[in-house]
């Protein structure tokens, strides 16, 4: 009877671990395998020589070296290596240990092996997708602590992934947006139509700048309680435009240890629970110390999983059905592990249940890999960038929802179709050339530019492509692509390019001709001609200054505050004054300010203050002008006052600042004031002009103040 129970136990252990159990005697070079190795290795194995013949040529030497080391040290082992089975490459995971035969004293190896090819392949694919996504992908627990962040965080937001993991997500969110953003990111689920919640907010960049980002948050249904996956990408540009063997008992123990399994037997009538030493090891209990009762076992089961386990045992006893259940245990050392248990009930001659026998296997690593794989799947599916995987023939094997939306086709329609169906012939050729560059030994090419017909019209994309190979010489590979829509960015760049050509090339070239001719005229003996020539040169130089001012203030021409960020106004004013003192040594600059003054300003704010200070000096009507610059903090604003003792502004110049009305521009001052006005408007601020006492002008700039002071 005992032998029958042992047979059942061993059968259950091997069936659950989906493995072969083998033992090798180096002295006789004989190998025993249970069950047959044909399905796993493609051939029957009777010796170590047969085993080596299955191993991939590139892995044989390392496997032999590992085996020699294991025999010498009589240690345990855990190896992954490739085999060649029926012409294909497979990855095998082998674990076990060396032991000394109790009868002969000779060292033998015993272990289990299983095929992990598909698991490795899928893990590589999804990991590659995550690492190359242009989204920053974050996993956050219920307390708001970052558990994972993708490598893109360094490129997009200027942080190393290691420094972000373990910190509160809220630390990186702008103070003004923190409460609202955190409430969506951590407390929300799906919208009314079932789609993930989205939120746009400001994020502190690693270089101190503030960037606008959009996040899409999805609960991790199979992950830790209330953990969420957050896909975040920089939308600053968009805001600008829109506002994871049957042997002796010792042999059996070694096999169970190698497969991280433990066997047990529960006598139902007496409530005596007998654990093999392998089960004690599984639960982290010293050998021989288990109390031997069901209650002692139950208190080590995770509270959340105990009801389901007891229900499964009840059904097995009452209905004589085998049970198979995954549950968590909490070992005596506090470590939480995942166990899968298979068992069956044994009955007496009358059919009454007498005991329950079974085997438990530690599947913690498997669960972690499954959760990681599920996490990668979730990340890919929720990414806003189109993502796909192609086989060697160019057919889609995986697509996400974003690609389906971009193409106007369903995911089911895309999978199995060829990517060439979506591209022009020239782009198919360009894609093949790009892949050949990736296969070559040269440097990786830049992202591939493609156009795609979408329901919204033709869109331009940049695609980051990565190859995944099965590792066999002449084998197959898959292509992973992550695409980013750059249509708006390209159009914006084209418009800026046109403006630069006009202002910096055409106008400048013509001005150079005017300056050259005026210089020649100044050399003429006729004083009247010289006077006119100097006037021409002065006007040309002023026009050149206008062109340079327009170039420097280029970002301020957009009528929105997309470039506005939090900044210490005091520091900006101090830099302007330092430069002015070097540029105008004859002028006196008096600065009044009382500590840091944090406000929201456009990126051209410093240029605008510099323009006001320079104008105050350059348009003075005496040799040693005095300019006073004052920074004041009010309840909701920060003001900068620039006071001079010059002749004052003309009525037209006042209108430019106060009303922003269109009128003819005079000298460089007119355009400069227009650019100052636009910059302050884009900062969400105001400008006021008044007469100074006893003479001169006071220009006061007011911009929004951060209510909580300096951002954290």
Image: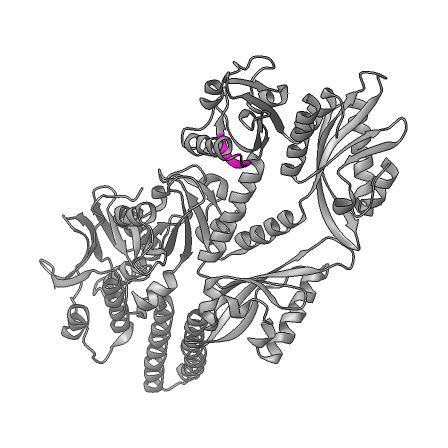
Residue that lies at the very extreme toward the front in this rendered image: 350
Residue 79 visible: no
Image quadrant holding the N terminus, namely top right
- Say left or right for 694 vs 318: left
Q: Residue at 48% of width from left, 69% of height from top?
A: 410
Q: Which residues are magenta?
A: 320-328
Q: Is residue 413 magenta?
A: no
Res. 7 image quadrant: top right
Q: Is residue 326 magenta?
A: yes
Front residue of this view, candidates 432 and 245: 245
Q: Residue at 75% of width from left, 52% of height from top?
A: 89
The x and y percentages for residue 540 are 36, 78
Res. 227 image quadrant: top left
Image quadrant holding the C terminus, namely top left
Front residue of this view, candidates 590 and 349: 349
The x and y percentages for residue 400 are 49, 61
Residue that lies at the very extreme toward the right in this rendered image: 28
């Amino acid at each position: 009877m005992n032998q029958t129970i042992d047979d059942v136990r061993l059968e259950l252990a091997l069936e659950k671990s989906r493995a072969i159990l083998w033992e090798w005697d180096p002295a006789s070079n004989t190998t025993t395998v249970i069950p047959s190795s044909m399905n796993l290795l493609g051939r029957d194995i009777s010796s170590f020589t047969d085993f080596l013949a299955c191993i991939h040529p590139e892995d044989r030497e390392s496997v032999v070296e590992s085996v020699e080391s294991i025999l010498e040290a009589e240690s345990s082992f855990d190896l992954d290596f490739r085999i060649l089975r029926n012409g294909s490459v497979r990855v095998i995971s082998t674990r076990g240990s060396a032991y000394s035969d109790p009868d002969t004293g000779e060292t033998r190896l015993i272990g289990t092996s299983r095929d992990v090819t598909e698991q490795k392949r899928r893990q590589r694919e999804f990991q590659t997708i995550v690492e190359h996504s242009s989204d920053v992908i974050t996993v956050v627990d219920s307390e708001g602590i970052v558990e994972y962040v993708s490598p893109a965080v360094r490129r997009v937001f200027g942080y190393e992934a290691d420094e972000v993991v373990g910190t509160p997500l809220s630390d990186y969110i702008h103070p003004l947006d923190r409460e609202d953003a955190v409430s969506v990111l951590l407390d929300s689920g799906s919208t009314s139509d079932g789609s993930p919640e989205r939120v746009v907010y400001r994020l502190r960049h690693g270089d101190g700048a503030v960037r606008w980002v959009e996040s899409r948050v999805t609960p991790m249904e199979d992950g830790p309680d209330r953990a969420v996956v957050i896909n975040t990408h920089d939308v600053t540009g968009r805001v600008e435009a829109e506002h994871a063997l049957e042997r002796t008992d010792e042999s059996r123990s070694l096999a169970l240890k190698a497969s991280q399994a433990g066997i047990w037997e529960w006598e139902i009538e007496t409530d005596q629970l007998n654990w093999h030493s392998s089960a004690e090891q599984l639960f982290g209990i010293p050998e021989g110390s288990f109390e031997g009762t069901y209650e002692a076992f139950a208190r080590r089961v995770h509270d959340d999983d105990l009801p389901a386990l007891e229900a499964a045992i009840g059904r097995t006893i009452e209905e004589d059905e085998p049970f198979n259940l995954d549950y968590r245990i909490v070992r005596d050392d506090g470590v939480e592990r995942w166990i899968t248990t298979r068992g069956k009930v044994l009955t007496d001659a009358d059919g009454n249940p007498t005991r329950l026998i079974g085997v438990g296997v530690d599947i913690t690593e498997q669960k972690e890999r499954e959760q990681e794989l599920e996490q990668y799947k979730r990340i890919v599916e929720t990414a806003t960038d189109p993502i796909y995987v192609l086989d060697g023939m160019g057919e889609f094997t995986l697509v996400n929802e974003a690609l389906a939306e971009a193409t106007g086709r369903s995911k089911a329609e895309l999978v199995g179709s060829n990517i060439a169906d979506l591209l022009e012939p020239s782009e198919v050729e360009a894609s093949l050339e790009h892949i050949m560059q990736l296969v070559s030994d040269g440097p990786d090419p830049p992202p591939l530019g493609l156009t795609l017909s979408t329901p919204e019209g033709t869109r331009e994309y940049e695609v980051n492509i990565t190859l995944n190979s099965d590792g066999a010489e002449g084998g197959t590979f898959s292509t992973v692509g992550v695409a980013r829509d750059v249509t708006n960015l390209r159009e914006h760049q084209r418009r800026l390019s046109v403006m630069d050509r006009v202002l910096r090339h055409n106008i400048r070239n013509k001005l150079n001709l005017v300056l050259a001719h005026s210089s020649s005229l100044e050399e003429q003996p006729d004083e009247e001609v010289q006077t006119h020539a100097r006037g021409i040169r002065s006007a040309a130089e002023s026009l050149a200054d206008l062109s340079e001012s327009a170039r420097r203030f280029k970002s301020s021409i957009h009528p929105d505050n997309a470039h506005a960020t939090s900044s210490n106004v005091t520091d900006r004013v101090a830099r302007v004054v330092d430069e002015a003192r070097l540029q105008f040594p004859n002028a006196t600059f008096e600065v009044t300010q009382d500590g840091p003054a944090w406000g929201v300003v456009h990126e051209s704010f410093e240029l605008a203050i510099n323009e006001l200070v320079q104008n105050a000096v350059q348009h003075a009507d005496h040799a040693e002008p005095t300019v006073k610059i004052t920074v004041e903090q009010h309840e909701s604003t920060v003001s900068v006052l620039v006071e001079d003792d010059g002749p004052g502004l003309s009525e037209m110049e006042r209108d430019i600042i106060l009303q922003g009305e269109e009128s003819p521009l005079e000298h460089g001052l007119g355009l400069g004031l227009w650019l100052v006005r636009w910059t302050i408007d884009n900062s969400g601020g105001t400008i006021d002009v008044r007469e100074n006492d006893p003479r001169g002008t006071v220009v006061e700039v007011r911009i929004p103040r951060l209510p909580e002071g300096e951002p954290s």
